[in-house]
Amino acid sequence: MSDKLVAFYSRANENYINGTIKNLNIGNTEILANIIAELTGADIFKIEQAQTYSKDYNECIAQAQEDQKRNARPELKIYPECLERYNVIYLGFPNYWGTIPMAVFTFLEHFDFSGKIIKPFCTHEGSGLGGSINDIKNICLGAYVETGLAIRGGNVNISKTEIEKWI
Ligand SMILES: Cc1cc2nc3c(=O)[nH]c(=O)nc-3n(C[C@H](O)[C@H](O)[C@H](O)COP(=O)(O)O)c2cc1C
């Protein structure tokens, strides 16, 4: 039983990678989350919306933007039962419209993270972590939010040294 948890959000299917739309079997952040879990021995949990966004890239973009505009809190499929035994949470997400996906807001608001170390990591197409760190800090009051890791989506498989250094 580990005292570390990798909790991440990721979406497979159509995505925009290095200028073209590609169909991914596994999302970029999920690949990165698996690498981090393997390197740290952490448990792993996937944050999933009850109603997933479209497999179509452009539709997904519109749905996510709409959810952000109305500050939605999409319902999640399941939650980890309890986070008590975890001291370190590696929190992974794709940059969605400059910050964390709204489902990650839902996840973060569900638990008390005070006293825990949060290590945020994201994949993106150019905007890095955006405003995500501030948003996480504003929700997870009392948590120690450490420096984030931002990897371009298409580079997750060639960034092991950077990932190891950040861990
Ligand atoms: C709804 C949506 C919004 C996005 N917004 C941004 C953005 O604001 N900035 C950015 O750099 N990339 C943005 N992207 C690109 C994703 O962050 C990037 O493709 C990421 O690697 C996807 O991770 P995933 O495959 O784990 O879902 C967006 C992608 C989607 C689907």
Image (spheres, helix red, strand yellow):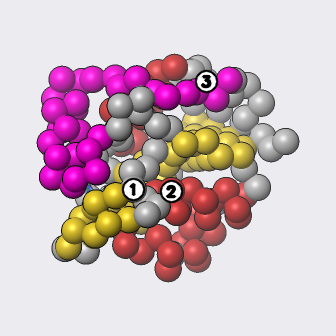
Is the distance from the Cβ of mark 1 to the nearest ligand 1 atom less than 8 Å?
yes
**Residue linked to disc 1:** 12
Q: Amino acid at mark 2?
A: Glu
Residue closest to the eye, 79 or 6: 79
Report the side of 140 relative to 132 (left or right): right
Asked if residue 58 is among those painted magenta in the image, a careful observer would answer yes
**Residue linked to disc 2:** 30
Residue closest to the eye, 78 or 19: 78
Secondary-structure class at tag 1: loop
Find out whether the residues at labels 1 and 2 contact each other: C-beta distance under 8 Å: yes
Q: Earlier in the sequence, mark 1 or mark 2?
A: 1
Q: Amino acid at mark 1?
A: Ala
Is the distance from the Cβ of mark 2 to the nearest ligand 1 atom less than 8 Å?
yes
Mark 1 Cα shell of 10 Å, populated few (<14), some (14-19), many (≥20): some
Task: State the residue at coordinates (64%, 29%).
Answer: 80
Residue closest to the eye, 166 or 43: 43
**Residue linked to disc 3:** 114
Tell me the distance, in whole angstroms, between the alpha carbons under discs 3 and 1: 32 Å
Mark 3 Cα shell of 10 Å, populated few (<14), some (14-19), many (≥20): few
